[in-house]
Image (tube, rainbow, N blue to C red):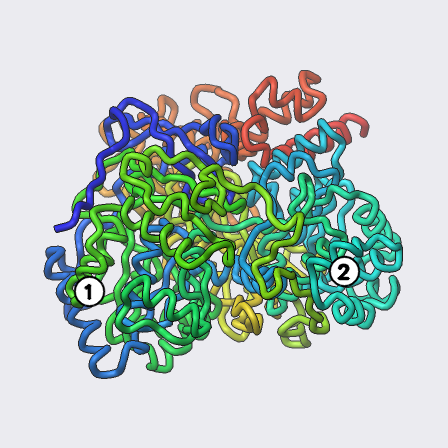
Amino acid sequence: MMRHDAPLSGRSDQPVRTTCPYCGVGCGILATPDGKGGAAIAGDPAHPANRGRLCSKGSALGETLGLGTRVLHPLKRNARGAYDRVSWDEALDAVAAGLKAIIARDGPEAVAFYLSGQLLTEDYYVANKLAKGFIGTPHVDTNSRLCMSSTVAGHRRVLGSDTVPGCYEDLDCADLVVLVGSNAAWCHPVLFRRIQQNRAERGARVVVVDPRVTASAEEADLVLPLKPGSDSLLFAGLLVHLADAGLLDESYLAHHTSGFEEALANARALAPGLATIAEGTGLPAADIAAFYRLWAETPAVVTAWSQGVNQSAQGTDKVAAILHCHLATGRIGRPGSGPFSLTGQPNAMGGREVGGLANMLAAHMGYSAGEIDRVRRFWKAPNIARQEGLKAVAMMDAVAGGGIKALWVMATNPAVSLPRADAVKAALAGLELFIVSENVLSNDTLTAGPHYILPAAAWGEKDGTVTNSERRISRQRPFLPLPGEARPDWWIICEVARRLGFGEAFAYAGPAEIYAEHAALTAFENEGSRDLDLGAHASLGRGDYDALEPVQWPLPAGRPGGTARLFADGGFFAPGGRATMRPLAVPALASQPDAERPLLLNTGRIRDHWHTMTRTGLSARLSAHIAEPALFMHPRDAERYGVSEGGFARVATEHGAAVLKVVLDEGARPGAPFAPIHWSGETASDARIGALAQAACDPFSGQPELKATPVSIVPVAYASQGFVLSRHGFALPPGSWWAKLAVEGGEGRLFATDGGPEVLMAHANAAFSGCELTEMIDRAGGVYRCIATRNGRLIGAVFLAPAGQAPLWDTVKAAFAAGREPENRLALLAGRSPGGIAEAGPIVCACFGVGLNAIRAAFAGGQALSAEDIGRQLKAGTNCGSCLPEIRRIGAQSRATEAA
């Protein structure tokens, strides 16, 4: 049996240097175990990505380490659809036997793997090696297809390789930072804080290009809220402006690029003048001209983008349009200057390195005959795949159509995150062999009924590497023991490989050996011909691997120090060493709104949650900022479609529907409401946004257009609204709308229902049987309130009021967290703090738990005049800074109130 339990680093009371499991910033973390299964979390001041800072999510990691939601043993689905605990040998033998039978009958392409940017590079590597090299199926894709695959395709088509040219230090020394389709203030807050520090200390200017006026836009010098899908038009116009202004780097173009004349002619056809660009983007011509002047006159410019560019049926063209402008001016690979992709997941780039995408083989190699043969010889692979596989959306279509009969899903939740998620969930349920490697006991994908659930290691237990947005490889080190029978993903994969007859090729003693093999493959027959070269790590031993410091690739043999920037002097990894500029398609959305579905639904992340909340949903403070699945609408749209602030709206597409709480947002583009992606069937009654999303994909990247799905919106009315707090769950009346969230000491639900006081009273009496109930009921007024206590402890609470009069729960939630029976139950029933303590109000700063009321009081009392004053007094905004725009808004509102 192979080693699966790497020793923990250092003594249990000593901090372990590891890496955050959330976004692609790749922040270093110091985790100090408490000896009880938890750990104190702090930023690592020595890590170059974050220099000690953490965002709200990273700061709260210690609150997500419990085992209450973990799957701890292999499980097998029985004839009743329930699950029985089985041994590892039984589970692994059955998985291998099932795969063998399907391959023998239907061929290797009847098998597929769906992976995740949450996997470590070592896990990813052996999964790809097994599938593509030894089983022989090319159908291996990843949730990174939904995240950054348009950037991958854009890089490869234009630069010749999937290479991010710059580094985070460029954000510190740029004189202009342009954020395109990126709400970095919320989604990459540690990097945004660096941008803002550059702006404050060096006078750098910031431009935000985004249909929504987000928190990032509130901190910008120029905001361009362009029409959805028009990004490539804006940057085609910039290329024309640069040419007409005589600002091209003719020498760079001549020596290091090809295709410029065709690309410029194409740009002129798309963007012949400001009037055309203004009409196509919906922006004032004066703002476009100001942006072009600013970009043209600032040599040190970083253009950074994220999902607003990538999640598009023309995402590859949008990336190319940005790259063209940097190539045409030679503003690439130089300090403070270059195009920069802000990666969404902690190891999206590591997955790309090992071939995690269906159209890549391994080590940034593709499916040319020479590359196939090179990987085959290195792996000694008997059945290597010889053509590209199905990308994520097409893969699920093949599952639905029966072409793929066995699917192994690892560390992701496709029944929530993929477009047409309802159809995906139904397709998964019909698989002949459905295997899921997971670390949670329940999620939407698991409710689709996998035949085997394999318990995988979680963050804090994993041992391996990840690669962040700036090509920096960092170690994730374990600081907690593996619980129950959980095992690392690489171990699970290798054990299946051994049972399939491939044991010799997968006989790794641990992740260090896997990493060294991966590094050796990147250097194999490379000699400078490929961007990804980790030759300096090809002979890395266990001790050096354990001590590995964060380092950027390329790392060719003899150059272990890493490389910060590339392409300043050309040297592209393409034929002739030249980047290739390419004509763009006419900018257009995949689907246009019509009379039936007149709006375009924009989707994305919120500040304090991540993916489908299987981790962040465990933290009470991360659930406090935005507690309910919401639809952010411009007030004009809300008025037009008959919905109001705090009410509910049914949002529907041809693929699915959701019911969301309405939030009026002046920053939302008229005609383009925004819905967060995080809620699932586990955490809300009716808020799976993936179920609404269309599946139209970019022709080069296969990335779906998740930012612009035509939708209809109608109001939904409920008779009553309220909240429940409970130690052990609470059954709401059938047909209720609800959102579940973590609270200190138990579970909270915000709900709306057509049930009245009598119905909720019956449910409370059933849920809190054996407790002493203190109740208040007003049948005529539609009010019911209940406090449940037992043995001196507050067990639960139910508050109900007519719709539009939903009771605030901050006071009751605080008493519930305290746990003990309140001295004055009647005061608590009235929503007053029994001890007379001032309430914090809704949380604004999740890092330090600072509420709205404290910030308002500081401004109103004159103790604070600025966000910086608030930071000095209350600490709010002094960590990741993602709440600073909101603090500044509160200050502005306070000043306006005083002036009135």
For mark 1, what is the residue?
A: 502
Residue at the (54%, 71%) spot, across then down: 694
Label 2: which residue? Answer: 234
Q: How many neighbours does mark 1 have within 10 angstroms: few (below 14), some (14-19), or many (20 or more)?
A: some
Disc 1 to disc 2, C-alpha distance: 52 Å
Q: Residue at x 34, y 33 (%)?
A: 547
Q: Where is residue 747 in the image (x, y as percent from the top left)?
A: 35, 42
Q: Is residue 305 visible?
A: yes
- Three-letter residue code for mark 2: Leu
Q: What element carries label 2?
A: helix
Q: Quadrant of residue 525?
A: bottom left
**Image quarter hosting the C terminus:** top right
Q: Which of 338 and 619 is in front in this view?
A: 338
83 horizontally vs 370: left or right = left
Name the kind of residue labelled 1 in the image: Phe
Relative image position of residue 115 (x, y in whole percent): 37, 60
Which residue is drawn at the image coordinates 39% and 37% (left, top)? 743
